[in-house]
Amino acid sequence: NAGVTQTPKFRVLKTGQSMTLLCAQDMNHEYMYWYRQDPGMGLRLIHYSVGEGTTAKGEVPDGYNVSRLKKQNFLLGLESAAPSQTSVYFCASSYGTSQYFGPGTRLTVT
Amino acid sequence: AQSVTQPDIHITVSEGASLELRCNYSYGATPYLFWYVQSPGQGLQLLLKYFSGDTLVQGIKGFEAEFKRSQSSFNLRKPSVHWSDAAEYFCAVVYGGATNKLIFGTGTLLAVQP
């Protein structure tokens, strides 16, 4: 039981490049979330999903897209990366109200 | 709007001393409250949660928290801190009904002196 895993762990992008972050969970959770963590700002919700095939915007969705084609996977896409998207990205999943977090992806956009 | 405030950005305590980390929330209804811990370079781990009932809740690693509705607070405590407790601690509240979305505080970074 791996819990919540994230791929990749680190990535450096140039401005304008695109990439996809993968989150996978093996706990059969319905709900999944993408957050970004920036110094002094805690975690902020980017997008979330309440089930396979559904997605919704969170607090800071601009510049990101998501897809939930399979229940166990939640993908976060950056179509045209900007330096402001330099951050640590965390995925989480939940069945009830308790969320379980992945180890994070550190993304740097130069 | 719902919000969570952690007034202490950084706290330093000596090993063996007691600890209290403050958390205040703004939420119209009865809140679901959480404390998470993040060790350097790691994800967040759930320490404890409060939904209802007994206002003093016990968590993992010897932590406890007390919900005080009159003060809109959910402070985290530990009677004797260990060096391994050095980490960042986040308070959070659920909002958004059935979607279980969390609002996080900005975190308190705990340093432990030998």
Image (cartoon, coloured by chain):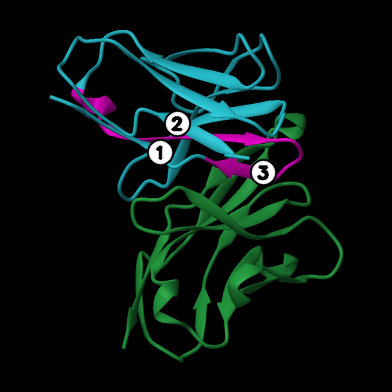
Chain colours: A cyan, B green
> According to the image, label 2 marks what residue?
A6
Q: Is residue B5 magenta?
A: no
Res A96 quadrant in image:
top right
Question: Looking at this view, is A110 or B30 the one in front?
Answer: A110
Residue occupying image coordinates x 15% and y 17%: A14
Tell me the element at label 1: loop
**Disc 3: which chain?**
B
Q: Where is the C terminus of chain A found, in terms of image quarters?
A: top left
Res B83 quadrant in image:
bottom left
| Residue B94 badge | 3
The answer as to whether the residues below labels 3 and 2 share one chain is no
The answer as to whether the residues below labels 2 and 1 share one chain is yes
- Which badge, 2 or 1, comes first in the chain's sequence? 2
Q: Give the answer, above or below, for where A93 lies relative to B14.
A: above
Q: Give the answer, above or below, for where B18 lies relative to A53.
A: below
| Residue A104 badge | 1
Residue occupying image coordinates x 62% and y 77%: B62
Q: How many marks?
A: 3
Residue occupying image coordinates x 79% and y 55%: B51
Q: Amino acid at mark 3?
A: Val
